[in-house]
Amino acid sequence: MRTLAPALVALASSAAIAVAIAAPVRAQDVAADSTQRLRRGQETLSPDALRLDLAARDQTRGDVRGVIEDLEGLDLSAGMSFDQADRAAFLLGEAYLELGDQDRFTSLARQVSAWKRESVFTRWLAFELRLIENGGAAAPGLSGVADLARDDAATALAGADTTSQLGRDLAGAALIRLAARATAAGQDARAWLERVPTGSRYAARARHMLGLLRLEHGEAAAGRAALESLLADDSTYTDRRQVRLALAGQALDQGRWESAHQIYRAIDSDWWQQHGLLAQLSSPCSLDTLWAAWGAEPARSGLMLLDARPARARARQLAGAAADLGARPALEPPALDEGPATQAPATSVAPPPAEAWSAVMASAGRVAQAEAELERARWDEADARESLADQRRYLAIGRQRVRGEEAQLLASAAFLDSLRATLASLDSRLRGMRDAERAHIAARTAAILDQCAGNLLWMRAMARFTLAGPDSARMVAHPAGLPGPDSLLAAERGLAGAVAALAESLAAGTPALLARSYTEAWRPAVIDRAAREAAAARAALVWARSIHGSIDSSLAAARAPTSGAC
Amino acid sequence: MLQRPVRHRPVPRPLLAVALAALLPGAARATDPAAPSAPAVTEVKVERTRPPRERLATLRFLKENRAFFRARLDQLHQTPQRGRGEATAIDPRFLAYQRMLAEVGAARDSAAGIDQERQGRGLFASINDLGRLESQLDQVERMLADQRARLGVLQSDFNGLQRTALAIVLSGYPRAAVLSTVSITLEGGRTLAVPLSAGQVESLQRGAMLQVFHGLVEPRSQVVEVTLAGDRWPQGDSGFVALEPPRDRLTLLRLNLSALEPAAGAPSIVASTWLHDAELKTHDARPEP
């Protein structure tokens, strides 16, 4: 895992450079038509489309978290639920990979792989899913491990297309494997070795092996020439000491003592140099160097590392282009190639086997996944802290208001208490007014009854002395159709009777009505109301203090734990 | 806030005293000292013997006024005339009665509305309700004041139609004798015998008055004979009261029997006369609309 760290750093740097290069382009695109996104926002009204629009904006800003939070709520399991679902899935997957969250990416890509509709985005997701499933995504850029230990795989790869570097390397590795197996079987392996492509990174080993085989087959000059040319052509070849040993042995056989001595001195020098290097590597701090050396020659572990960095760079480029919802990019996944040869000090320390490499890569994948989960935990922590800050602000406002309410309630309670004497006086005045009104109404109704009696007496007198008098016929005579005095007098008697009845009912009912009004309306509305409000103020004060305590407790709980909160 | 609304409207004084004075002048003065001045009461003497009268006074009166009587008799002759009969204007009194009748109806409706509101009132919720009650009482008092104004109009109309009349009333009851019948003999010989029932006697004993006569009389000097019958006067005991009723006025003659002495007989009756007021004496008379 430690050997992969430099590669990760290097790849991260390259990714940052790629983003930095791509960002101005995006900015220029946006600046070219700043209203485009707004217009598009007006046209897309569905919630999914709005989520995608927000995610595109976050993608443009490089906000991975924003993209994930915008798009994670989409249901992508049921196929293309809306028109731009493939774009949304791709942006979400890229955000997952940027975060290092392989698990979620794998789950998402497998969901998308079940879709019937295919697009450049779905193809990219499938491509990156294959990279991960082949174990490469743990170390972005070192993807795809081929196990050459299997004969069928080696035979198949020996005839690979050698027009590409990857094909040449695959073919070279397979031919080396086949040659080693033929040698072990006592067969002539030169034919396999001569087929190793010149541009392959295994060409030097093939020349080494071919030189040794020629020496064994008595072709001393040819073998010596091959080995010497190897030493001359490739100063970085790891087994240069073995080549020299073979040449030194050949010189001894041929009696060229001086030449053999010089070769052995060079070997000795190389050995001491190697010894010093190994002494350095024995330090724990130098394990990275050792891993770098092993990584520089994966073939020694029977592995071939494919370079996924170009693919990742293109995927990021596509993600940037996908943020422009008005355009449909057509950037297809690239062909994979073997990772570039890295400069690392040669070492004679045996590299780990392929299984160990796989375990290391799996471990790196788990580390990346853990880091992704850690990043998510940080997001959750930030959310929680923000929520707590909001809650604190809310509670602080509430506490301030409760304090104000408490002060107001205290003032109200004090004021209501001070009103007691005033209310007692007011109650006395109310009772006095009630009694005075009762006497007043009685006097007025009595006066009205007296007036009624007087009017009635007057009317009876007129009736007796005029209408019923000796000249009655003349007194009551009147034109037809018009009322006479007798009719008017009868109506007046009826009115006086009605008024008298009204006055009597008022005189009889008003005292009880006044008493009831005092008991049920005046006193409850004034005297009892003050008492009720005082009680309500006290209850509200108790409640406010209870709320205050509750708010203080909540505030104490809402004070965010510092570093150990997650 | 809790002060009862102050009423500034003065209570109108009634015209009641006018009517009471017509019926019971003494009682009106006793019960209402602030009432308008009662009609002047004139004590008259009940004589034992019939007052002497000037002979042939009627003939001399007719001779002195024969030209007037002839002119009046000439008007009784029917003389055909040429001309067209035209409708005369309706007496405005009756138009006023129609309007006053409508006012009475409106007042009754108002009283019924007030009563209905009173019945529906559960409480005086505020002082404003008390103010409304005061307003309603003011309204009732205005109704009564308006009624008195209308009664005054009616009284004035009646007074305008008044002819010469005499009303004789009895009051009091003798303590020392039982009075069974009172007979009144008017000028011209017409006699009214009024037997006193037990209820009437009880009423007289309690201070009531009993009207024994009310009729038209001539506006001249005349003598009214009063005859008492009872256990002390099985054959009757008479007294004579000289009167001179003025023209077109109602003259009231009161015979107070409370001082009647069995030995003195009818002359011990205390008699008095007064005139029914021809004009209304009001404190708040309102102009007739």
Image (cartoon, coloured by chain):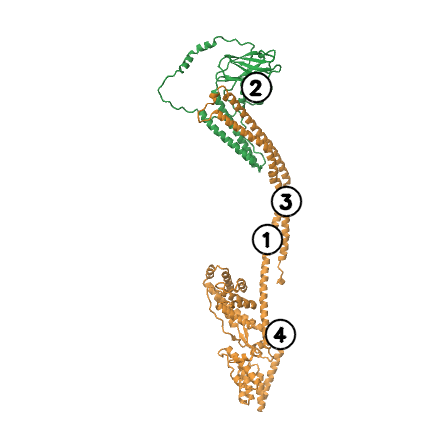
- Residue at the spot x=63%, y=52% of the render? A548
Q: Secondary structure at mark 4?
A: helix
Marks 1 and 2, Cα distance to the nearest angstrom? 93 Å
- Residue at the spot x=60%, y=54% of the render? A395
**Residue named by callout 2:** B209
Colour for chain B in the figure:
green
How far from the left and from the top, in percent, is residue A202? 54, 81
Front one among B35 and A221 = B35
Query: Residue type at mark 2?
Result: Met
Q: Secondary structure at mark 2?
A: strand
**Residue named by callout 1:** A397
**Residue named by callout 4:** A285
Q: Secondary structure at mark 1?
A: helix
Marks 1 and 4, Cα distance to the nearest angstrom? 56 Å
Marked residue chain, label 4: A
The answer as to whether the residues below labels 1 and 4 share one chain is yes
